[in-house]
Image (cartoon, rainbow, N blue to C red):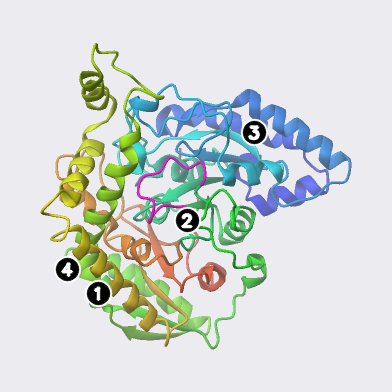
Amino acid sequence: MSLHSLTIHEAGGLLARREITSVELTTAVLARLSAVDERVRAYITTLEDRAMSQAEEADRQLARGATGPLLGIPIALKDILCLNGERTTAASRILEHFVPPYSATVVDRLEALGAVFVGKTNLDEFAMGSSTEHSAFFPTHNPWNLETVPGGSSGGSAAAVAADMALAALGTDTGGSIRQPAALCGVVGFKPTYGRVSRFGLLAFASSLDQVGPFTKDVTDCALMLQAIAGQDPHDSTTSPLPVPDYSAALQADLRGIRLGVPREYFVEGMQPGMEETVRSAMGALQAQGAELVDVSLPATPYALATYYIIAPAEASANLARYDGIRYGYSAGASSMWENYDLTRGVGFGTEVKRRIMLGTYALSEGYADQYYRQAQKARTVIKQEFDEVFRSCHALVTPVTPTVAFRLGQRLDDPYQMYLCDAFTLPANIAGIPGISVPCGMLDGLPVGLQVLAPAFDESTALRVAYAYEQSGHFRSGKPAL
């Protein structure tokens, strides 16, 4: 038995029965990380000493009879989530040496449940990208084919789970940055409803769009991770006071009585040949589990990409103004304040971050805010209203996650528009604030394909139920990448 290949619920059972220890499990994961990460490059920082200390404490708790689904489980954290006393970079030179004095709420919640943190994973700088090639340090490689991208921006977290270098990981999703890399790496990835999970301690990209969520090896683990991090947080006024349901109780293979909408706008020209057939085959498996499939329309979907790339850069330009070389982070050390400000941001930020800051500043500038930003907010309202209307007749929607499988490293770096199109099927959910999950549903050209399930706001349970039913149908088993 390879301990590093276990799921959370499998490892949790072994730990509870004292058939293995957390130290043994953590040692196995760290050994796997040491063996393969030189090729995958999923991690910016590994935390061997901290992980072993946490594992030892977990074993002491287990010996005293403590229980819990995450107690002693090795987990990775996207390096945009603050971890007290550990370097947190956002994959940017401007924060290359930043060590926060506190942890994100989601990190605190995992730690309180006895999780073991094995490292901080790579990402596109400040989560701005779709391939994890925009990291200031190095690109991450897809474990299924090391010459292809893992997706982004949470590519390091997705690759770490796919390559068995963590039993689960946290990522963030602003326009698809959990679901898209989950699809490209053949793992499960969940974006919760906006407000379901605290953003406190997350280095902000776009504050009205960002959400923290899990990457896992199966849907059961996804429910366990979401249970651990969901809920209201007094440190984040945007979190909802709604009670958090028992997500594991939602995992049913029977979909009788469930109506699933299939939006026609999510099957478009330009999709990779075979993608539509693969996804529709997966939808057929949902029918076999009892679901009813109905054609629906979301007419504003074609405007979602433009809407997102006005709102998200506008919010980024405001959020990233704090990195000025004065208070913390990198400073160019120039003689005057304005020269230092210009040099710090010019050197500290990468090309994609600077591109989005300029787009956002322009969209908010005098004389253009009405033409761009306010129009985008109106379009956002229409997009949300369309989802609300469709959910009056459907319990959930099923769609592709991406128009193609993973593409080759470097293939789209010089074509930002083609890169942005990677998220065309995921970013509408962020605009509307609804939950979505990606579950592996097939292979195309030797690379994974994901099925996306979107549900009404705060109905993560239905998204999990549909994904679990598909997983249990036996329609597709992804296996493991041959690293």
Can the viewer see residue 272? no
* Residue shown at the point (23%, 78%) measured from the top left: 299
Label pair 3/4, CB-CB below 8 angstroms: no
CA distance separating discs 2 and 3: 23 Å
**Quarter of the view holding residue 412:** top left
Dot 1 corresponds to which residue? Answer: 265
Q: Where is residue 256 in the image (x, y as percent from the top left)?
A: 55, 86
Q: Which residue is label 4 attached to?
A: 269
Q: Does the magenta stretch include residue 202?
A: yes
Q: Say which residue label 2 marks.
A: 189
Position of 158 compared to 339: left or right?
Answer: right
Q: How far apart are marks 2 and 4 (CA)?
A: 26 Å
Q: Is 320 on the left-hand or right-hand side of 69?
A: left
User: Image quadrant of residue 95?
Assistant: top left
Q: Which is more foreground, mark 1 or mark 4? A: 1
**Residue that badge 3 annotates:** 28
Q: Does the magenta stretch include residue 356?
A: no
The amino acid pointed to by label 2 is: Gly
Magenta stretch, residue numbers: 200-211
Rendering coords of residue 391 (x, y %): 42, 81
Q: Mark 3 or mark 2, which is nearer the start of the sequence?
A: 3
Q: What element carries label 2?
A: strand
The quarter in which the C terminus is drawn is: top left
Question: Visible in this render: residue 114?
Answer: yes
Q: Is the magenta stretch mostly helix, strand or loop?
A: loop
First in residue order: circle 1 vs circle 3: 3
**Above or below, comparing residue 31 to residue 427 in the picture:** above
